[in-house]
């Protein structure tokens, strides 16, 4: 079987082919005389030599318009075939040049070897204790470059003063490799939360990090931590790049943004007769004993704790002083019995905070808050939870923000 390659502008080669291919690797000569290797497309309507010859003799131009490659099956070329080939060659002079598909070339100068991560052979997950907190502090300082080892040691000192529920770690967990080095850590602040007569255990996960060589084990590390389904876990400061992983672990939004309320003018609501006292004085009105302990504990941790006392009841409030952008003072609402109570006492609280140089209050919210003057920002400091009890807005007590100021 003979294959004749008929690429434009002229017939350039005749080669023996084992089968009627529709795309043939051949050499094509361009108008400037340079030959290049490529694939010549073929579109054969009829593979019979007799019909091709008849069509070529009748109308060479029409035959050339539908033929890129001509397949013939004679044993030897003869004069009967040469005449139509001459007509075809002349007709193909004006036919568009066949497309050339050059073979890809690899630029060796831009290639570099890629090393795939290798899973560590063996790691252990242990509780953070007094004996290993120094190594964990060094790991945290390495993975969070803006912090120092001494800062994390101070964090451990504050956590040591907080009483964790029985059966839960005092500081958190860390991952240890086969050489005994800390390669991953997560802090856990566990506490008993009371809402009315209901008590639940809430675990605040914070400062989760894994060394680069062991990040392939990050998901299994956090999964081992979350194995107790009866507990409620919260993450109030997730890093943006960890959000997909957090949602894969079963966490859900309970706070989607922040509401920023001005202190002056603070609210359009009516003013309630109220007396504001500090935590050093026990109110004369009714209050819960756990509320007094809550205010005392957070006041020792640097928060602004106060009572709004009415003849019927003493209402507790806790705020964490902070700086926006490093120079604008404001406070973050840490604890109140409900957002409605905050709105009710907004005017006296606003006057109290303004006298202390705090211009606005940030609070967890899922939208605008009625009767408060301010703006709502979607996506600012979202918070997530996993477990049987959904946290309520206005309760960040005994979390990293309330106890540690992080």
Image: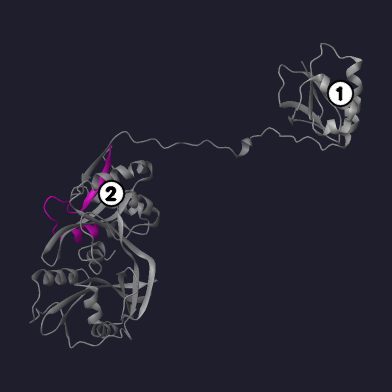
Looking at the picture, the colour scheme in use is one colour
Q: Nearer the N terminus, badge 2 or badge 1?
A: 1
Which quarter of the rendering shows the N terminus?
top right
Q: Position of residue 379 (x, y in %)?
A: 38, 64
Q: Position of residue 364 (x, y in %)?
A: 30, 69
Tell whether 269 sits left or right of 96. Answer: left
Which residue is painted at 36% across and 44% down in the image?
215
Instruction: Pick out the residue farthest to the top.
Output: 75
Q: Position of residue 356 (x, y in %)?
A: 27, 82
Q: Is residue 158 magenta?
A: yes
What is the number of the mark on residue 241? none
Q: Is residue 274 visible?
A: yes
Query: Of the residues tagged 2 and 1, which is closer to the observer?
Result: 1
The residue under label 1 is 54
Q: Is residue 209 magenta?
A: no
* Image quadrant in which you'd find residue 399: bottom left
Q: Is residue 326 visible?
A: no
Answer above or below: position of 73 versus 165.
Answer: above
Answer above or below: position of 127 versus 32.
Answer: below
Specify few, some or many for label 1: CA neighbours under 10 Å numbering under 14, 14-19, or 20 or more.
few
* Image quadrant in which you'd find residue 240: bottom left
Tell whether 38 sits left or right of 119. Answer: right
Along the line of sight, which residue is nearer the eye, 122 or 217?
217
* Image quadrant in which you'd find residue 98: top right
Q: Secondary structure at mark 1?
A: helix
Q: Which residues are magenta?
A: 153-178
Specify few, some or many for label 2: CA neighbours under 10 Å numbering under 14, 14-19, or 20 or more.
many
Q: Position of residue 9 (x, y in %)?
A: 86, 33
Which residue is painted at 88% across and 37% down in the image?
94
The residue under label 2 is 185
Along the line of sight, which residue is nearer the eye, 143 or 105?
105
């Amino acid at each position: 079987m003979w294959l004749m390659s008929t690429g434009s502008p002229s017939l350039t080669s005749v080669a023996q082919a084992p089968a009627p291919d529709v795309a043939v690797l051949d050499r094509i000569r361009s108008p400037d005389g340079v030959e290049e290797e490529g694939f010549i497309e073929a579109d054969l309507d009829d593979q019979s030599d007799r019909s091709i010859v008849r069509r070529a003799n009748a109308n060479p131009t029409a035959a050339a318009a539908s033929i890129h490659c001509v397949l013939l099956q004679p044993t030897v070329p003869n004069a009967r075939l040469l005449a139509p080939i001459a007509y075809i060659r002349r007709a193909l002079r004006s036919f568009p040049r066949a497309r050339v598909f050059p073979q890809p070339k690899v630029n060796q100068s831009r290639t570099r070897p890629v090393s795939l991560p290798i899973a560590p052979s063996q790691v252990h997950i242990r509780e953070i204790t007094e004996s290993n907190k120094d190594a964990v502090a060094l790991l945290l300082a390495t993975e969070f470059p803006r912090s120092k080892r001494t800062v994390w040691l101070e964090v451990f000192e504050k956590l040591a003063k907080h009483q964790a529920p029985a059966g839960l770690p005092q500081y958190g967990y860390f991952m240890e490799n086969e050489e005994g080095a800390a390669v991953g850590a997560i802090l856990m602040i566990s506490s008993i939360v009371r809402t009315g007569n209901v008590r639940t255990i809430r675990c605040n996960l914070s400062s989760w990090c894994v060394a680069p060589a062991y990040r392939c084990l990050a998901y299994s590390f956090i999964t081992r931590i979350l194995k107790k389904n009866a507990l409620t876990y919260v993450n109030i400061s997730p890093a943006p790049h960890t959000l997909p992983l957090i949602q894969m672990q079963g966490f859900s939004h309970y706070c989607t943004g922040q509401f920023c309320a001005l202190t002056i003018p603070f609210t359009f609501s009516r003013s309630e007769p109220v007396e504001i006292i500090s935590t050093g004085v026990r109110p004369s009105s009714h209050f819960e004993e756990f509320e007094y302990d809550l205010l005392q504990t957070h006041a020792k941790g640097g928060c602004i704790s106060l009572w709004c006392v009415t003849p019927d009841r003493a209402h507790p409030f806790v705020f964490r002083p902070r700086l926006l952008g490093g120079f604008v003072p404001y406070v973050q609402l840490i604890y109140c019995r409900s957002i409605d109570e905050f709105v009710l006492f907004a005017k006296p609280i606003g006057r109290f905070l303004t006298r202390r140089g705090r211009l606005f209050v940030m609070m967890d919210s899922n939208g605008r808050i009625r009767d408060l003057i301010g703006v709502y920002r979607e996506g600012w400091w979202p918070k997530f939870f996993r477990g049987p009890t959904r946290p309520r807005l206005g309760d960040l007590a005994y979390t990293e923000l309330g106890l540690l100021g992080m």
